[in-house]
Image (spheres, rainbow, N blue to C red):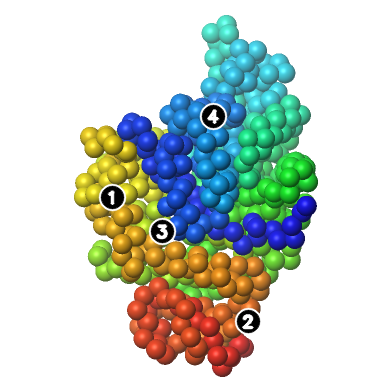
Amino acid sequence: MLSKYHWWRDAVIYQVYVRSFLDSTGDGVGDLAGVRAGLPYLKKLGVDGIWLSPFYPSPQHDHGYDVADYCDVDPLFGDLAEFDLLVTAARRLGVKVLLDIVPNHCSSEHPWFQEALSAGPGSAARARFHFADGRGADGSEPPNNWHAMFGGPAWSRVTEADGRPGQWYLHMFTPEQPDWNWRDPQVGAEFDRVLRFWLDRGVDGFRIDVAAGLFKHPELPDSDDPEADARTRDSVNPLAWNQPEVHAVWRSWRSICEEYTARDGRERLLVGEVSVPTAREHALYVRSDELHQAFFFDLLSAPWDADAFRKVVSEAMQDIAGTGSTVTWVLNNHDQVRTVTRYGEPAPEGSGLGAARARAAALLMLALPGAAYIYQGEELGLPEVVDLPDDVLTDPIFRRTGSRARIRDGCRVPLPWSGQASPFGFTSGVESAKPWLPQPEYFAEYATDRALADTRSFWHLYRDGLQLRAALPQLGEGTLRWLDSPPGVLAFARGDGLVCAVNFGTAPSSAPVSGTPLLSSGPCPAGVLPGSTAAWWMSDGTESPAP
Ligand code: NOJ
């Protein structure tokens, strides 16, 4: 029996970066048994589901986004039996489980890529990837001028079986991540098999890596502006990303999910990592027969400014709501500088401004119509670890560019759970264990046990916000109505009477609404909305709509 309620439309999903969540074996790397042990904590927080970062067998050149076998668990993280236990435990608690699927590229250790290397030019095995002859008299120039997202050219040359330099293959990320050729039907068929493998094991859906990728322009022509492609990690090369053919894949994946739903009534969710230039293009990915959700990253990249936030929210509502989907809001993930640090700059360290703004942003996000994703540690107010020494950095961006700009290790440092010193309870039972990235001493302040005990903590703010979302029909899905508010303050009404206002400035403002206070991100005297603060009220109906 299909339910009319689509749980995913206003779901709050918690992103578990498995290697940094909780380590059950004492090897310093988080694992699936650790995730299972942490489920009660997540249930208490009140999230609807979890998205697990890739745990498949992988040489870990890009922490699992280089998949060598899509249908197994890397021994680093456990095994299939442990995975099954995790799914069962989550189901028992009513927590949905989403896997991270990586269809744009695999690992150079994937058996099909190894087969392609030995099969040679012109073979069916090479047709599953993008192999091409090089340019120049001796083929020593890459086939085109595309740049890889993580630095350097997007092509690497192979040595053929006879020992001579041979063809080149395309990799939009690192050379260890060859791109699949989705124009070869075997690739799509293999991914259908992979989806079914995990759906049969009971998962509730998939987060799809690089969902605007997969297809490249069929002729692989030169990019007009390779320098612009190189300057940004955004998907700006229109020949490599966002090709129209990709939409047929999402329609087909959606129908697979629906086939499973028709069998057991459990709705599965596909959420795409879609980086495209405009909200309008983004909306194409969430048409009613494609992905259920696509991360809307514009909020994540918006500066702390009322006008910037208002523009992003308005565009998303206008362009995405029309698809019949809902907007999927994100403030943090494993690729971005954490909000506490991002919003803190350039304020002097220790001013607390970043934390105050991150708390306000959280209340704003949780009040917006649609779904939201929380990245582990966000609920603790963890700052970015900005001073990791070069010799511990593992991000391939650092390895490929030699620059610390945009490196992602700082948001991936293992979570603190308890105690005064590293490993802060991250590794179970082995006090001498060394987490795979060093945890700073100040992580003690953020440990989950302290957070749970302190009602003023980030954790309680998130938990209270999630509880209200669950209790109040005005939150979650629906529309948003902007309200009149002083400059630097955003205020909007949700449904019947619920008002959220955020003061982006540092000076106090008058509260743009009168009514019953429900929740605020900081102390909020009656009638006042202090700087860098957000609040929710149940209004008495006296506020006026924005002109
Ligand atoms: C996006 C993922 O979020 C990121 O961590 C990864 O490095 C790239 N895709 C490549 O798979």
Disc assigned to residue 496 = 2
Query: Which residue sits furthest bottom?
Result: 542
Q: Marks 1 and 4, Cα distance to the nearest angstrom?
A: 29 Å
Disc assigned to residue 379 = 3
Residue 373 to residue 186: above or below: below
Residue 397 to residue 143: above or below: below
Q: Amino acid at mark 2?
A: Asp
In screen coordinates, is 118 left or right of 460? right
Q: Which residue is nearer to you in this view: 78 or 484? A: 78
Q: Are marks 1 and 4 in contact (CB under 8 Å)?
A: no
Q: Is residue 36 visible?
A: yes
Q: Quadrant of residue 528?
A: bottom left
Query: Which residue sits furthest top?
Result: 162
Q: Which residue is nearer to you in this view: 346 or 448? A: 448
Q: Marks 4 and 3, Cα distance to the nearest angstrom?
A: 29 Å
**SS class, disc 2:** loop
**SS class, disc 4:** helix
Q: Are marks 3 and 2 in contact (CB under 8 Å)?
A: no
Residue 473: image location, x then y, percent: 62, 73
Residue beneath the point at 45% across and 87% down: 511
Mark 3 or mark 2: which comes first in sequence? 3
Query: Which residue sits furthest front?
Result: 92
Q: Which residue is nearer to you in this view: 459 or 125? A: 459
